[in-house]
Structure formats: C-alpha cells, structure tokens
C-alpha cells in the first residue's frame, strides 16, 4: 500500500532527500514491466521482507501478492500510480492552495515515513484521523493487519455516510 501523495504541503520532509528508488523505477513507462516480467516473485519478496522489518508475511499472503503482480499488464497497472504522481501532486497543490480540505482525511504512517504522516501534514483538514506505527514498517497492512484494520474503523463513518 503506497500512499505518498506528491507535494502535500507540510509533508515535504518525508521525501526531502528524494523519493525512494522504486518511485523513479516504476515511473518510467515500460521499464519496470520489461525488467521484472518473469521475476515478480523475488521483487515482491524484497518489498514484503523490507516492509515488514525482515519478518515477511504468511505464504498465502505472499502468493496473493505475487499472483496480483504477475505479468506485464498487471505490473503496468500497478505502476500507473507512480506515473500519475505528477498529476496527483498538482491536483493536491491546487486543492490546498486557497482553501482547507473539506473531505474526510486520514493518514496511516509507519516506519520510516511516520514523521510525515500526521495532522501537521495537511493544511487545516475538517475531518481528521491519524494513525502512526513506528514498529510496523512500510507494509503496515500486511505486517500488522489487525492494528491497521483498527486504525481504519474510527474513520469509516466519515467516508461511509449517506448524506
């Protein structure tokens, strides 16, 4: 679950030294798909192991990740998020330039990006929920699924209401 949103005012320090290497690798159309096709398992394993501080994930979860990312088309779709970051960043910059956010806003942060994942990251949100885990690592949902789920529950009434 990658969730860096681009140039979100107040969170610049998260990528002050540059975005992680895979942001650039995934952003180049066709590059990652060409390099990784047929090698998805070791690539996914690197993220699952690094993102869980070396603990990895159960075999069935690992298999689901590898299945989801298998093949050039699946990889292309997965990496389209990175390719859209410049547009997303501009949209966010435009949205917060003149007004506060009016939609429910939540951050879920974990090691090593937790310092940028808090209420100070977003200019004057109206509805704010915040969760930080300094021990769960970057794969918070797969590394600490119960804690991650619990962090989402208080926020769900804000996004699931029927106004």
Image (spheres, grey):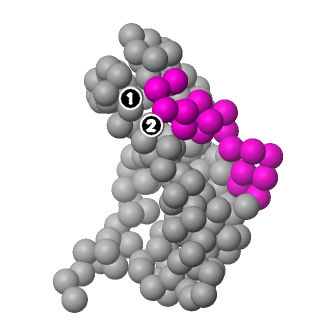
Residue 148 image point, x, y percent: 43, 54
Can you identify the residue that label 2 sits on? 79
What's the residue at 72%, 51% (across, down)? Answer: 15
Is residue 88 visible to the viewer in this orientation of the structure? yes
On the image, the x and y values in percent for residue 9 come to 67, 70
Vertical placement of 86 versus 64: above or below?
below
Q: In which quadrant is the C terminus drawn?
A: bottom left
For residue 31, the mark is none
Q: Is residue 17 magenta?
A: yes
x 53%, y 52%: residue: 85
Is disc 2 placed on a helix, strand or loop?
Answer: helix
Task: Give the labeled residue for mark 1.
Answer: 75
Is mark 1 in CB contact (under 8 Å) with mark 2? Answer: yes
Residue at left 53%, top 77%? 95
Residue stretch in magenta: 13-31
Up-down relation of residue 9 to residue 41 (above or below): below
Disc 1 and disc 2: Cα gap in Å? 6 Å
Q: In this view, does 145 lie above or below 109?
A: above
**Depth check: 43 or 157 in front?**
43
Give x and y (percent) for residue 109. Answer: 57, 56
Place residue 7 in its image quadrant. bottom right
Residue 146 in magenta stretch: no
Q: Which class describes the residues within 10 Å of circle 1: few (<14), some (14-19), or many (20+)?
A: many
- 139 or 102: nearer the eye? 102
Q: Nearer the viewer, residue 97 or 43?
A: 97
């Amino acid at each position: 679950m990658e969730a860096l949103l681009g140039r979100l005012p107040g969170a610049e320090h998260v990528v002050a030294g540059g975005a992680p290497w895979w942001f650039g690798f995934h952003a180049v159309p066709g590059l990652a798909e060409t390099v990784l096709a047929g090698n998805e398992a070791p690539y996914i394993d690197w993220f699952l192991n690094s993102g869980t501080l070396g603990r990895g994930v159960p075999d069935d979860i690992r298999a689901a990740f590898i299945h989801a990312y298998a093949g050039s088309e699946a990889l292309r779709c997965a990496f389209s998020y990175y390719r859209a970051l410049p547009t997303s960043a501009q949209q966010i910059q435009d949205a917060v330039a003149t007004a506060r956010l009016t939609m429910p806003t939540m951050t879920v942060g974990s090691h090593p990006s937790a310092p940028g994942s808090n209420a100070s990251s977003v200019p004057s949100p109206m509805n704010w929920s915040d969760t930080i885990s300094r021990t769960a690592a970057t794969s918070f949902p797969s590394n600490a699924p119960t804690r991650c789920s619990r962090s989402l529950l208080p926020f769900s009434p804000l996004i699931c209401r029927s106004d």
